[in-house]
Image (tube, grey):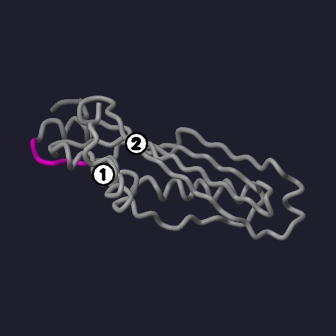
Amino acid sequence: MSDKKETNAEKANESTEPHFSIEKIYLKDVSFESPEAPAVFTDAWDPEINLDLNSHGKPIEDNIYEVELSITVTAKNKDKTGFLVEIKQCGIFSINGVDANTLHGMLGSFCPNILFPYAREAISDLVTKGGFPQLLLAPVNFDALYAQHVQKNKGETVN
């Protein structure tokens, strides 16, 4: 009997069957700013929320990929920035036995879908700890965003 324990990634590399596993989910970078504090707390709170999100995946080694979901949330109240939250929620995923189109779809849609609830929770916690009412981001349809991205870039060559 061998004392060596195989990781999910090593097991996946031995198989030709399609395989997906989450190796690690982690917070890579986070920032919270409230540049108008404490003055922002004296006004009635009726903010305009702006959400920017982006994701990208990159190979780390054979069949192992890092996917980074970047989210920036800006809340403005009467032209004052109440808060600005920037977060990079990441995951390491083992993906094996899929064609290139399926792989791109997994990195562009499936993996960000997995990461989003973690980012959503971190943003909510930061906003609350910053003294503001809880902010729960609405679900995001990463499948539709990915489809739009593919449609927009159709015909463009990737170097």
Depth check: 103 or 11 in front?
103
Look at the image and say whether residue 29 sits in the magenta stretch: no
Q: Position of residue 135 (x, y in %)?
A: 64, 64
Looking at the rendered structure, which numbered label has been put on residue 158? none
Q: Position of residue 15 (x, y in %)?
A: 11, 41
User: Which residue in the structure is indicated by mark 2?
Assistant: 56
Horizontal placement of 120 versus 66: left or right? right
User: Which residue in the structure is indicated by mark 1?
Assistant: 150
Q: In this rendering, is residue 28 above or below 150? A: above
The residue drawn where x is 80% and y is 47% is 35
Task: Please tell me whether mark 2 sits on a helix, a strand or a loop.
Answer: strand
Instruction: Indicate which label's residue lies in the foreground, 1 or 2.
Output: 1
* Amino acid identity at mark 2: His
Task: Please tell me whether mark 1 sits on a helix, a strand or a loop.
Answer: helix
Placement of the C terminus among the 4 image quadrants: top left
Quadrant of the image occupied by residue 133: bottom right
* Amino acid identity at mark 1: Val
The residue drawn where x is 56% and y is 64% is 137
Depth check: 47 or 150 in front?
150
Q: Residues within 10 Å of mark 1 (few under 14, many from 20)?
A: some
Placement of the N terminus among the 4 image quadrants: top left
Q: Which residues are magenta?
A: 16-20
Q: Residues within 10 Å of mark 2 (few under 14, many from 20)?
A: some
Task: Give the distance between the C-alpha atoms of the residues marked 1 and 2, in whole angstroms.
Answer: 13 Å
Q: In this rendering, is residue 144 above or below 22? A: below
The residue drawn where x is 48% and y is 59% is 117
Q: Give the mark nearest the N terminus, 1 or 2.
A: 2
The residue drawn where x is 73% and y is 55% is 129
Q: Position of residue 96 (x, y in %)?
A: 19, 42
Q: Position of residue 152 (x, y in %)?
A: 34, 52
State yes or no: discs 1 and 2 in contact (Cβ < 8 Å): no
